[in-house]
Structures are given as structure tokens and as C-alpha cells.
Image (cartoon, rainbow, N blue to C red):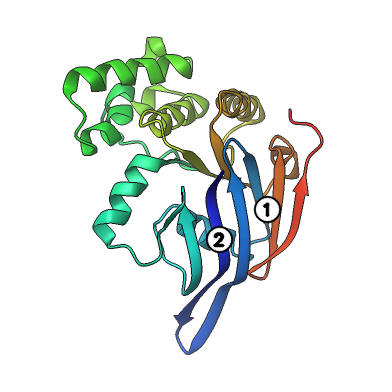
Amino acid sequence: MSVLELEDVTKSYATGDVLVEALRGVSFSVGEGEFVAIMGESGSGKTTLLGILGCLDRPTTGSYKLVGEEMTHLSETRRARLRGARIGFIFQAYNLLPRTTAAQNVELPLVYAGVPARERKRRVLEALAAVGLAERIDHQPNQLSGGQQQRVAIARALVTTPRVLLADEPTGNLDSASAEEVLELLAQVHAQGSTIVMVTHSSEVAQRASRILRFADGLLVGDELLAAVG
């Protein structure tokens, strides 16, 4: 089953008097349980693409389906509800709230979703334990290393049990040892059945995926299945 499906997607926007064609007729699908890396130089369209996949932006033309549901013409309210229920986000800069604990950061999506307090606590503790931070639940971001902060961000992304994880340069701010820890964690999450789409500049990081989509000038120019993962 396709979790994400794009058909002839374009995205254009004006910068002053110049019309920028960020995506120019992109079509592909991502199946349940795939681990896909998206690569391309700056300006290739991959950031624009991630915004569309995450329901943060709409295509100019074309079709985008998330778990079989056409997203292009839905209301903002409906899109936001589906985004919260079906997508987990992992960002390069972690995007943690600075004066709140790891547990409170992970809990936030559940608060927005209206999950009862007792259930929230159970799921937060499970998510933090799953990323190896059961002993750090009361620590604030400035008390955690970069790698630990990214693991909190991964726990926050997983706590809603989304159908797909979207990761934007998840190791971009990390040293090599912390980056390896995060990639190992993503590999574990994938092995448990999660669908992951990861934007990265790094060929080495991309090799941890099972498939690489390559973009240039708003076009999908390569779709490579990898023989082995790890």
C-alpha cells in the first residue's frame, strides 16, 4: 500500500518579478514500511517537496495523497488534523521548547490531540524509554547533548504513532558519534515497521535508507533501490 503518492506535482511561487518553479511535474509513491532518502543540491526542490509531503504547503498543480486520501483541496482544519494524526516530524534544529522538560516536549502533540492525561503520561514514558532517555525525562534541552535533544525530538515524533516520519537533515547539527546514534535509532524505528522519508545532503547518511530519490532543478532525476540497508 502507498502511504504517500504524488502525481505530476508542481509548485511555483513569485519572488519579486521572477516566477520560481520549485517542483516541475514530480511523480512517485512511497510504500508502507519504506525508508526513503531524498537528496539534492540547494535549490533542487527537496525542501519544497518536504513541505508538501508534511501537509504544510499545497501543490500548485497535481495530486498528493496521504494514506490514500487526496490532500490538495482539503480545508486547513482537516489538513491540520490529518497532519497531527498521520505524520511525525524530525527537524535538524530539534525544535524543542527551551524551558520545558523532555517529557513535556514529547507530550505536546498528545495535548493538541486531546489525549487524556493518564494516557499521555504512559505514552510519553514509553516513547522516551524507546529512545534510551528514560532517566532524562525531567531534563530541559539545555541539560541535554545535541544527540539527546534529537532523540527527544524523535520520541515526540513517534508518540502519536504516525503512519510516516518526515526527517529534515536529522543529523545535520550533530557530531559524528551523535549522528551515528540517531541513525541507529532511525534504523530501529524502521525495523519496527515505520515509514520514514529523510532529506539529507550526505551520501553516507542516505545509504542508511532502503531507497534514494535524487532531485535537481525541481525534477526527480533518480530513484535507486539499495541492495542492503545499514
Q: Amino acid at mark 1?
A: Met
Closer to the observer: label 2 or label 1? 2
Residue 150 on image: x %, y %: 48, 31
Looking at the image, residue 228 sits to the left or right of residue 71; the answer is right
**Circle 1 — which element?**
strand
Is 208 situated above or below 38? above
Image quarter hosting the C terminus: top right
Whether residue 130 sits left or right of residue 85 in the image: it is: right
Furthest residue toward top: 135
Residue for badge 2: 6
Dot 1, how many residues are within 10 Å of its Cα: few (below 14), some (14-19), or many (20+)?
many
* Residue in view at x 40 percent, y 42 percent: 86
Q: Quadrant of the N terminus?
A: top right
Question: Is 54 displayed left or right of 200 in the figure?
Answer: left
How many discs appear?
A: 2
Viewer-proximal residue among 54 and 156:
54
Does residue 7 appear in this view? yes
The mark that comes first in sequence, 2 or 1, is: 2
In terms of image quadrants, where is residue 214? Answer: bottom right
- In what element is the residue under mark 2? strand
- Quick one: label 2, few (<14), some, or many (20+) residues within 10 Å? many
> Residue drawn 50% across and 29% down?
146
| Residue where numbered disc 1 is placed | 39
Determine the CA span between mark 2 and mark 1.
17 Å
Q: Residue at x 64, y 24 (%)?
A: 177
